[in-house]
Image: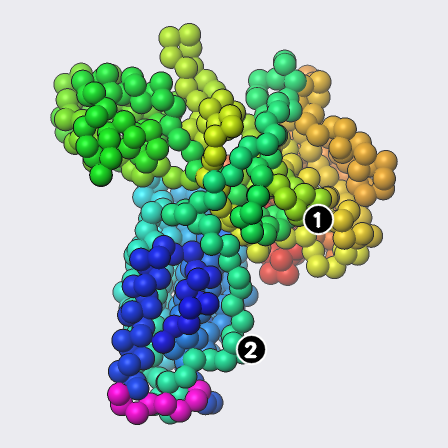
Amino acid sequence: MISASVLESAPFSTEQRAWIAGYLAGLAAGHAASGDTAAPSATTLTLNVLVGTQTGNSEEYAEDLAAAARAQGLAAAVTSLDGVTADTLATLENILVVTSTYGEGEMPDNAELFWESFHAEGAPRLESARFSVLALGDSSYDGYCQAGKLIDTRFEQLGASRIVPRVDVDVDGDDDAAAWIGDVVEAFAALQPASAAAAPVPADAAPTRTRSPWSKKTPYPSRLVANRVLSGPGSAKEIRHYEFDLGDSGIEYHAGDALNVVPSNDPALVDLLLDQLDASGDEEHAGTSLREQLGTALEISAPSKDLIQAIVEADPDSELGRVVRLGDKRDLESWLWGKDSLDLLRLSPSARFDPLEFAGLLRPLQPRAYSISSSPLHSPDRIHLTVASVRYGSADRRYGGVASTHMADRVGDSAIGIYLQPNAAFRVPEDDSAPVIMVGPGTGIAPFRAFLQERQGRGADGRNWLFFGDQHRANDYIYEDELDEFGRSGLLTRLDLAFSRDQAEKIYVQSRMREHGAELYAWLEEGGHFYVCGDASRMARDVDDALHEVIAEHSGLGADAAADYVAALKREKRYVRDVY
C-alpha cells in the first residue's frame, strides 16, 4: 500500500490522503489475494508524467501522481513537456499529462515548444500509446483548462487510447485531482504484469521530495514583521516591502519560489454588502455566519460568472444585461473592469437575492501568490515580498486589492496564513560562472533581488545584468540603495535603468535591450541565462519581441534563425519567465 511518507509529503488534506491511501490499499490487497508478491522486474510499467506549468502548481500534482504510482510498484518519470519532442513521444507507451493553462487559454511557457511540434501536421501517430490528462485552470477565465483540453484532443486525433477521461481542475479542485490520481494508478496497476505488480519501487530508485506540511487547506499562521513603503510620495503607485516570520514552520524556500498569502476581505465592504442584501450577517451559511463567510471564505471583489448570469436573468434590462446581450467579450470585460459584486447589485435594482442565495453564487476566496524577493542564504528565517497595493476609486467609493490592502492596512499584529509555492523552473543557474540577464521593471524586480542575494551568498563569480525601470526615478526607484551596493561590490556587473516618463520620449526596459543589443547577444553566446518577471500582457510580450530583434540583428542570421535561437534557449532552460 501507499507509504506514510508519500502521503505526508503530498499537499492534499488529511481526508484526501486517506482517500488515496484507502483506494490504493484496496488495489494492493487485491494483488495480494491473487498471490502477486514478486518484486518489480524489467516488465514493470513506466508511467511518463509530462508537466506543463507556469508557476509550479502542476509539478506538485505530477510528483504526487508519480509517488502514488511508485508506491504501487509502477515506475514513473516526471518530465517537462518541453523536454519531450514529438518523435520521442511516439516511443512512449504510457503518457500522463498534467498541465495548467496560462492567460486566456494559452500553453504555459514550458509547453510551448512541445505544442508547436505536437499539433503540427506531420506529428507522428500514437496508436500504441495510452494516455490521460489532468488539466488545471481557473473557471473565471473563458479559456478554462484550454491547454489541457487541446492536448487531450490532439492525443485522440493521433490515435492514442485514453485510459482515464480527462479531468478539469478548478482553483479549489484538489479533490478532483486526488480522484484522478487514484483512477490513473488503478488503471495502470491493472495492466501491470503479475510478476511485477506487488512491491513498491525502492525509495532509492524513486526519490520523492520533502514538502512542507503547510498548504492552502492548512496555511502557516505567520506574522508580518516588516511592512514599509518603498515608493516615494509622488509615485502613482504604493509599493511595499513585507517580511513574513517563518518561526517554527520548517518552511524551506528557494530563490525563484512564490509565496501564497491567504487574505481576508475588507470588513467595510462586507458591511456594505450585508446592507445591500438586507441581511444581519448572523444568518448561518456553510456551518458559520454569513458575515464570517463573506469576510474570509468567499470572493466578493471580483464578480463570479454565476453571479453575473444570475443578475442578467433577474434583471435583463439592466446595464449589465444589455452589455451581455451584445455578446462582445471585450466590451463585457471593459464594463466589468473596476467593479465588484456590490456594484453589480447596485446597478441592477431588479435583481434581488436572498442573502444565502447570493452567497451560493460566489466563488471561494483564493490565496494570492507573490514572487519571493529574498534568498534563504540571506534571510533563512523570513520571506520577503515586494507588492504594489491596489487602490483606486473616487471620494464616494474607494476600492482596494483584496490581499494587497489586507497586508498593507489590516493585518497589524494578527496572524496571516501563508504557504510556499515552489517553482523549480525559475531558478538561479546551478553553474555559478554562468552570466545572468534579468529583466524586471516595477515589482518584477522581486525575484531578481532574491537571485542577486543568492549569487552573493553562493560566492558565484558569474556576471549579472539587471534591466529595471518604472515611471519616474525620483519616486519609483525601489531598492536603489541595495542595487547601488550590489554594483559597488561587483556583484551587479551591469544595471540599465528605464524610467519611462522622465523624458518626452517614453523609454522602457525593452528600449534599453535594443540599445545594448550587441552586448546582450554576446552574453547569450557566452552561455547567458535570460529571465523575465512582471506583466504578462504587455511588458513580457514586448521584451520577447525585443529579444528576437536583438538576436536577429546581432547574429546576422535573420528573423527565422532568431526564432530558432530563442527556442533553443527555452529548451535549454536559459530563457524562463515568471509573468502574471
Q: Amino acid at mark 2?
A: Asp
Give whichever of 453, 522 is nearer the camera. 453
Helix, strand or loop at mark 2: helix
**Which residue is at 34% across, 20% downward?**
269
**Which residue is at 62% across, 24% downward?**
228
Q: Disc 1 vs disc 2: Cβ atoms closer than 8 Å?
A: no
**Residue that badge 2 annotates:** 204
**Residue 189 visible to an observer of this rendering:** yes
Residue 281 percent location from the top left of the image = 23, 24
Residue 55 percent location from the top left of the image = 50, 49
Q: Amino acid at mark 1?
A: Leu
Say left or right for 519 vs 182.
right
Give whichever of 48, 161 is nearer the camera. 48
**Residue that badge 1 annotates:** 377
In three-dimensional space, the C-alpha distance between marks 1 and 2, rounded to whole angstroms, equals 29 Å
Query: Is residue 496 a member of the stretch shown in magenta?
Result: no
Helix, strand or loop at mark 1: loop
Query: Is residue 39 a member of the stretch shown in magenta?
Result: yes
> Chief secondary structure of the magenta span?
loop
Say left or right for 348 vs 200.
left
Position of the N terminus, as image quadrant, is bottom left
Could you say which quadrant of the image residue 103 lies in? top left
Extreme front residue here? 248
**Residue 447 visible to an observer of this rendering:** no
Q: Which residues are magenta?
A: 33-40
Q: Earlier in the sequence, mark 1 or mark 2?
A: 2
Could you say which quadrant of the image residue 538 lies in? top right
